Image (cartoon, grey):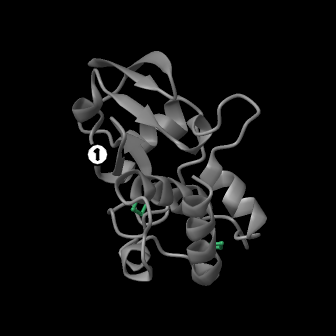
Amino acid sequence: MPRFSLTVNGKSVTVEAPADLPLLWVLRDKLGITGPKYGCGVGVCRSCTSHLDGEEVQPCVVPIADCAGRAVTTIEGLAKGDTLHPVQQAWLAEDVAQCGFCQPGQIMAAVALLKHTAEPTDEDIDKIENVCRCGSYFRIRQAIKRAAAAR
Ligand code: FES
Ligand code: FES
């Protein structure tokens, strides 16, 4: 079976996997990184949202072969030691999560948005397509605005 080396949350890893195995399965089943959630498996619900070389991706539709030599960041890699990322802090301040299932993906999408848009408008925030079955969208919006204002 082919082997692929990549960086995951700052650590170098090498995995054996079929070239077409989606990154989400590598993360969850081979590396035990379960923050990215499996929802639809076809790139629609976005509960698996993570970053590849700093840009938002949906790991359920990214083959591991496309990740070789690259850097993956999941929700587990966002905090610096005991210090939460400002977006995570804003999430707590706004008490965003309900069941929590979609929240790792929501936070990773918000971090990606703020990377490119320092002061997002409601319209910018509405472009985030991550699904929340609990309907936490209003609090997500408030948290993103709080994180933006804190920078
Ligand atoms: S699991 Fe739904 S987009 Fe990845
Ligand atoms: S908090 Fe339950 S699905 Fe979003």
Residue 126 spot, x, y in % from top left: 41, 79
Label count reads 1
User: What residue appears at the point 53 percent right and 50 percent down from the top-left corner?
Assistant: 36
Q: Is residue 126 above or below residue 28?
A: below
Direction from residue 102 to residue 126 in the image, left or right: left
User: What residue appears at the point 49 percent right and 60 percent down from the top-left corner?
Assistant: 110
Ligand 2, by image quadrant, is: bottom right
Of 91 and 114, nearer the camera is 114
Please identify the quarter of the rendering in which residue 1 is found: top left
Direction from residue 26 to residue 57 in the image, left or right: left
Direction from residue 145 to residue 95 in the image, left or right: right
Disc 1: which residue: 62
Q: Is residue 128 visible?
A: yes
User: What residue appears at the point 59 percent right and 34 percent down from the top-left corner?
Assistant: 32
Secondary element type, mark 1: loop
Direction from residue 48 to residue 135 in the image, left or right: right
**What's under tag 1, amino acid-wise?**
Val
User: What residue appears at the point 23 percent right and 31 percent down from the top-left corner?
Assistant: 65
Near mark 1 (Cα within 10 A), the count class, few <14, some 14-19 or many ≥20, is: some
Residue 132 spot, x, y in % from top left: 55, 76
Residue 20 spot, x, y in % from top left: 24, 38
Q: Is residue 101 above or below residue 123?
A: above
Residue 136 spot, x, y in % from top left: 63, 79
Of 126 and 103, nearer the camera is 126
